[in-house]
Image (tube, rainbow, N blue to C red):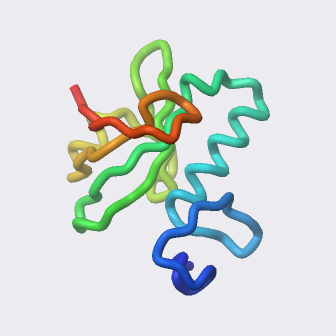
C-alpha cells in the first residue's frame, strides 16, 4: 500500500503494521526489531537505492563484522551488496550514522 493511498501524502515514514506498509516502513520495522534484540544503533542504517525496475526503494543496511548486509522486503534473505548489484540495484544515499537525520552518498565497494 502506498503512502498516498494510506496517509494521503507522497511520503510518510512509519513502522509497518498489520495493514502493511511500503519499503521504508518495513526497513524501519526491521530496525526497531533488531534494536529490541539489542543490536547497536550505530550498525543499523536506513538506505535508499534504485532497483532493477528504476523504482526508488528503501532498505535497512546492517554493518556486520564481515561487511554490510541489506535487509530488503523484496528479497527473502539478507543480501550482501554484491548480490544486489548483480540483480541491478544502484545505491543512492544512506544515513550518515544509525539514527541520524543526515544522509551521505551510499558507496558500494
Give the residue at the far top of this rendering. 65
Residue 5 is situated, as x and y percent measured from the top left of the image, at: 56, 86
Q: Is residue 78 visible?
A: no
Task: Name the quadrant of the C terminus.
Answer: top left
Residue 62 is situated, as x and y percent measured from the top left of the image, at: 50, 30
Q: Is residue 35 visible?
A: yes
Asked where in the image residue 50 lies, by quadrant, the reply is bottom left
Q: Is residue 48 left or right of residue 52?
A: right
Give the residue at the far front of this rendering. 102
- Residue appearing at x 74%, y 65% in the figure: 17
- Residue appearing at x 63%, y 27% in the figure: 41
Instruction: Please determine whether, in this image, residue 10 is positioned above or below residue 104.
Output: below
Task: Name the quadrant of the N terminus.
Answer: bottom right
- Residue appearing at x 33%, y 62% in the figure: 56
Residue 6 is situated, as x and y percent measured from the top left of the image, at: 62, 82
- Residue appearing at x 56%, y 68% in the figure: 12
Residue 95 is situated, as x and y percent measured from the top left of the image, at: 44, 37
Decide which of 35, 72 is in the foreground and name it.
35
Instruction: Please determine whether, in this image, residue 18 is positioned above or below residue 32.
Output: below
Asked where in the image residue 82 lies, by quadrant, the reply is top left
Decide which of 95, 84 is in the foreground and name it.
95
Decide which of 84, 63 is in the foreground and name it.
63
Instruction: Please determine whether, in this image, residue 34 is positioned above or below residue 56.
Output: above
Number of numbered discs overlaid on the protein picture: 0
Instruction: Please determine whether, in this image, residue 99 is positioned above or below residue 77.
Output: above
Asked where in the image residue 30 lies, by quadrant, the reply is top right
Amino acid at each position: 500500500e502506498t503512502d498516498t493511498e494510506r496517509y494521503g501524502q507522497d511520503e510518510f515514514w512509519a513502522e509497518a503494521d498489520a495493514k502493511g506498509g511500503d519499503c521504508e516502513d518495513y526497513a524501519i520495522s526491521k530496525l526497531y526489531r533488531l534494536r529490541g534484540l539489542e543490536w547497536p544503533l550505530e550498525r543499523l542504517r536506513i538506505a535508499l537505492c534504485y532497483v532493477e525496475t528504476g523504482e526508488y526503494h528503501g532498505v535497512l543496511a546492517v554493518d556486520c563484522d564481515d561487511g554490510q548486509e541489506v535487509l530488503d522486503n523484496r528479497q527473502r534473505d539478507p543480501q550482501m551488496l554484491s548480490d544486489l548489484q548483480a540483480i541491478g540495484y544502484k545505491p543512492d544515499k544512506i544515513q550518515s550514522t544509525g539514527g541520524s537525520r543526515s544522509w551521505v552518498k551510499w558507496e558500494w565497494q
